[in-house]
Amino acid sequence: MTRSAPSSPPAPSAPPSSEPAASPPARKPGVGALVRGVGGPRYVVALGVDSIGAGLLRPFLLLYGIDVLHLAALTAGLAMTAGVVAGLGCMPVVGRWLDRGARSAAVAAAMLVRVIGTVLLLAAPSGHAATVWAFAAAALFLGLGGQAVSAAHAALVSTISAGRQRDAALAAGRSVR
């Protein structure tokens, strides 16, 4: 007869816990995920160039009107203000367009409106009676495009990304602006 080793008592089991098992911590999206979330590297470069240009546009537009076109500071400032107010007024129309599904078309249209404003600005004659009207038209187009591009960009990013990636991409885009 062989003798068996005494068996050890079973280990006490842990009482059931009311807390769920700990899940691994959520990873923060990296730079690569942000780049993909915004639309890819080419779009990120375009967004950076646009953000720098938009940030420098208003002060240089004012200086261009005063120094190059020889407008009074009050006239140039009022024209720029009218352009921004008109841009705010166009936002309900842009919002409806975005609600109907236009995403990249809205971004392209807003950029095209800004290009038209820049062409009008460069075509404005210096020291001529039509200078004020040409500058005002340029400021109007630049104001409309500048306001519309922000909403259109946010809608485009929301279309191509979701969840935390979308939130991070929108926050990154706004911080660059």
Image (spheres, helix red, strand yellow):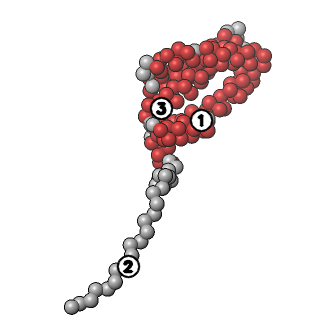
- The answer to whether one can see residue 83 in this image is no
Tell me how far mark 2 sits from mark 1, CA to CA: 65 Å
| Mark carried by residue 174 | 1
How many marks are shown on the rendered structure? Answer: 3
Q: Nearer the viewer, residue 41 or 119?
A: 41
| Mark carried by residue 8 | 2
Query: Mark 1: which secondary structure?
Result: helix
- Identity of the residue drawn at 53% across and 41% down: 168
- Residue positioned most to the bottom: 1
| Mark 3 lies on residue | 158
Within the image, what quadrant is residue 118 found in? top right
Which percent across, then down, holds residue 129?
Answer: 70, 8
- Identity of the residue drawn at 54% across and 25% down: 151
Q: Are marks 2 and 1 in contact (CB under 8 Å)?
A: no
Q: Residues within 10 Å of mark 1 (few under 14, many from 20)?
A: few
Which percent across, then down, holds residue 80?
Answer: 69, 18
Tell me how far mark 3 sits from mark 1, CA to CA: 13 Å
- Identity of the residue drawn at 48% across and 33% down: 157
The amino acid on which the numbered mark 1 sits, given as a three-letter code, is Arg
Mark nearer the viewer, 3 or 1: 3
Within the image, what quadrant is residue 90 found in? top right
Q: Quadrant of the C terminus?
A: top right
The amino acid on which the numbered mark 3 sits, given as a three-letter code, is Ser
The amino acid on which the numbered mark 2 sits, given as a three-letter code, is Ser
Which is nearer the N-term, disc 3 or disc 2?
2
Q: Residues within 10 Å of mark 3 (few under 14, many from 20)?
A: some
Tell me how far mark 3 sits from mark 2, CA to CA: 61 Å
